[in-house]
Image (tube, rainbow, N blue to C red):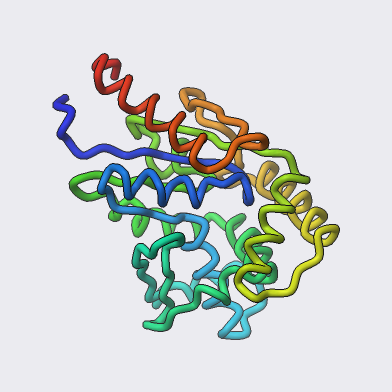
Amino acid sequence: MDEDDPYVVAIDGPGGSGKGSLALRIAKILGFHLLDSGAVYRLAALKVLDQGIDLEQEASVVSTLQNLDIRFEIGEELSIPFLDGQDVSTEIRQESTADAASIIARYAGVRKHLLGWQQACFQAPGLVADGRDMGTVVFPQARFKFFLSASVEIRAVRRYKQLIGMGISANIDKLQAEISERDERDRNRTESPLIPATDALIVDSSLLNLEQVAELVMSHIEETIENRSW
């Protein structure tokens, strides 16, 4: 395989681990396309919420998503999500949307419907994909796989700062409880549970900033390509 062949960098981890910011940084460095899988599910959840559909009714949820119109643009610090042609950056960052996304992500019909859309994002020159099952389900043959982790406390603080920075009110204790509950749901769901790929490099970002994690990831990628160890 030539080093110039398109390849996937899969970055998985729980919410608040820093995988989204890392994916954006790595995509810019490599000049690759970017897939924010978590945002895909939040956009799907927002569509369902906007339609007033009961989140517990799987058939209705799946039916609503048949006409899902979403796209992304790469911004300076975040990917910009569009639903039905509208910028919904603020809406998908609400905790209610994140919780709804975690609920509908349990459904096999939802995951199957969104799987093809996500896989179609892999185009030349390459793709950086972040989510919860990028390296295990969506791109199991990804050349590079990383799994980011961080303590619940650290992730709650990061989430708090992100929300406040966007002008959204937040409470640290509530965020910590919601993150813990979401982790439990994501780890124990039947469809694509949140687990590291067996061949993923696990990185604890609790005590590292974005630049340090990005440097670690890029060093691994560059060293692997240099040694042709794939």
The quarter of the rendered structure image containing the C terminus is top left
Q: Nearer the viewer, residue 86 or 100?
A: 86
Q: Nearer the viewer, residue 179 or 69?
A: 179
Q: Quadrant of residue 187?
A: top right
Q: Up-down: is 81 above or below 189? A: below
Residue 210 in the image: state x and y as whole percent.
52, 43
Q: Nearer the viewer, residue 140 or 30?
A: 30
The quarter of the rendered structure image containing the N terminus is top left
- Residue at 68 percent across and 68 percent down: it is 164
Q: Is 29 left, or right, of 152 in this rendering? A: left
- Residue at 50 percent across and 30 percent down: it is 197
Q: Is 28 left, or right, of 95 in this rendering? A: left
Q: Is 94 left, or right, of 157 in this rendering? A: left
Q: Is 215 left, or right, of 14 in this rendering? A: left
Residue 114 in the image: state x and y as whole percent.
42, 59
Q: Up-down: is 103 above or below 50? A: above
Q: Quadrant of residue 95?
A: bottom right
Residue 149 in the image: state x and y as whole percent.
63, 37
- Residue at 67 percent across and 53 percent down: it is 158
